[in-house]
Image (tube, helix red, strand yellow):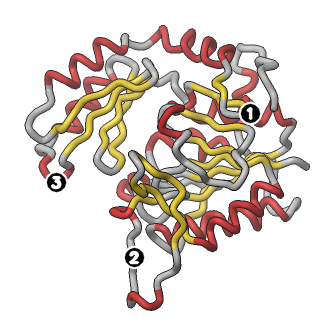
């Protein structure tokens, strides 16, 4: 049975220097591999062991990076020696096939987003309520917006007020590192993951993620993992089919790669209990789409 593995990137598989979460004496810490550069400077890392495990996972299953990054930001990441055939960017707004965004999927997503408030309205509100604790406010792929903040300086109640305002307009929020995201409800990693599983003929789906924006994906999978750090850990989120790592930081990324590989190699380890199949029957015929 073919398996598709859909995993978030930042703070799930890959880690910035600030997010490594090192513990223990220096001489015991593992070697790292840089998997992303920005302006010719190293930015994101995995352990060397995790890198080897991910290569094996890509051989055993269809490994699909799933991220809120834009396609341009995602293309900086070199997770594997050979780029994976599929990637999901912009929180499900784009499916990349051999690095190229599929226009049919993008059109379907934009059609669903018409029921929510316009991006311009939400971006304008986010800009108006931003104070000195906000470094910048940006839009991404003309689909959603986010603020880069000084997290320690966020006023009490500011995020809760923003979340309530967005909820009234069909949007949701997520605090990840130094970014506060405002995302329309129809923009779903899970729907895009189900589409990729359909295109590849997968019989089961595994997933991993650390933020509130990953909840739908984790719940849709037949089995899932989340790290013992991050937004979901902060709110104590759990689900019956989602396990939690013992490790934190970049060591959790290595543990996730190891455990996903073990599940992918064992055809009997994961019952077909996920809801991702139902996402293909929500009133839309699955798009034939592009395949590698």
* Mark 2 burial class by Cα count in 10 Å: few <14, some 14-19, many 20+: some
Q: Nearer the viewer, residue 238 or 285?
A: 285
Place residue 192 in its image quadrant.
top right
Q: Secondary structure at mark 1?
A: helix
- Residue 134 pos. (x, y %): 17, 37
Q: Please name which of the two marks, 2 or 1, marks the residue nearer to the observer.
A: 2
Whole-angstrom CA distance, mark 1 to mark 3, is 38 Å
Whole-angstrom CA distance, mark 2 to mark 1, is 35 Å
Q: Is residue 221 visible?
A: no
141 vs 221, left or right, is left
269 vs 55, left or right, is right
Mark carried by residue 196: 1
Residue at the (45%, 59%) spot, across then down: 15
- Residue 3 pos. (x, y %): 81, 49
Q: Which residue is under mark 2?
A: 22
Q: Is residue 85 above or below residue 184?
A: below
Q: Secondary structure at mark 2?
A: loop
183 vs 8, left or right, is left
Residue at the (52%, 68%) spot, across then down: 252
Whole-angstrom CA distance, mark 3 to mark 2, is 21 Å
Q: Which residue is under mark 3?
A: 152
Q: Nearer the viewer, residue 29 or 151?
A: 29
* Mark 3 burial class by Cα count in 10 Å: few <14, some 14-19, many 20+: few
* Mark 1 burial class by Cα count in 10 Å: few <14, some 14-19, many 20+: many
Q: Please name which of the two marks, 3 or 2, marks the residue nearer to the observer.
A: 2
Residue at the (82%, 56%) spot, across then down: 59
């Amino acid at each position: 049975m073919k398996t598709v593995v859909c995993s978030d990137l930042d703070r799930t598989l890959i880690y910035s220097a600030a997010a490594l979460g090192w513990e223990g004496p220096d001489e015991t810490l593992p070697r790292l591999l840089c998997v992303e550069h920005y302006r010719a400077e190293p930015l994101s890392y995995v352990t060397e062991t995790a890198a080897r495990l991910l290569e094996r996972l890509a051989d055993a299953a269809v490994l699909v990076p799933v991220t809120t990054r834009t396609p341009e930001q995602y293309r900086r990441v070199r997770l594997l020696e050979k780029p994976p055939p599929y990637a999901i960017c912009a929180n499900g707004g784009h499916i990349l096939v051999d690095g190229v965004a599929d226009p049919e999927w993008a059109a379907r997503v934009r059609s669903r987003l018409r029921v929510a408030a316009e991006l311009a309205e939400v971006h304008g509100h986010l800009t108006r309520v931003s104070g000195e604790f906000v470094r910048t406010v940006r839009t991404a792929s003309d689909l959603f917006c986010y603020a880069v903040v000084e997290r320690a300086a966020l006023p009490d109640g500011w995020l809760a007020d923003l979340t309530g305002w967005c909820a009234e307009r069909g949007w949701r929020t997520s605090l990840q590192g130094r970014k506060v995201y405002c995302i329309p409800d129809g923009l779903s990693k899970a729907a895009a993951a189900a589409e990729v599983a359909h295109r590849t003929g997968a019989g089961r789906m595994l997933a991993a993620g650390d933020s509130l924006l990953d909840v739908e994906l984790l719940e849709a999978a037949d089995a899932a993992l989340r790290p013992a750090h991050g937004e979901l850990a902060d709110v104590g989120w759990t689900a019956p089919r989602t396990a939690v790592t013992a490790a934190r930081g970049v060591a959790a990324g290595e543990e996730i790669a190891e455990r996903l590989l073990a599940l992918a190699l064992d055809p009997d380890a994961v019952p077909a209990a996920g809801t991702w199949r139902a996402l293909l029957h929500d009133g839309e015929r699955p798009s034939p789409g592009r395949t590698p």
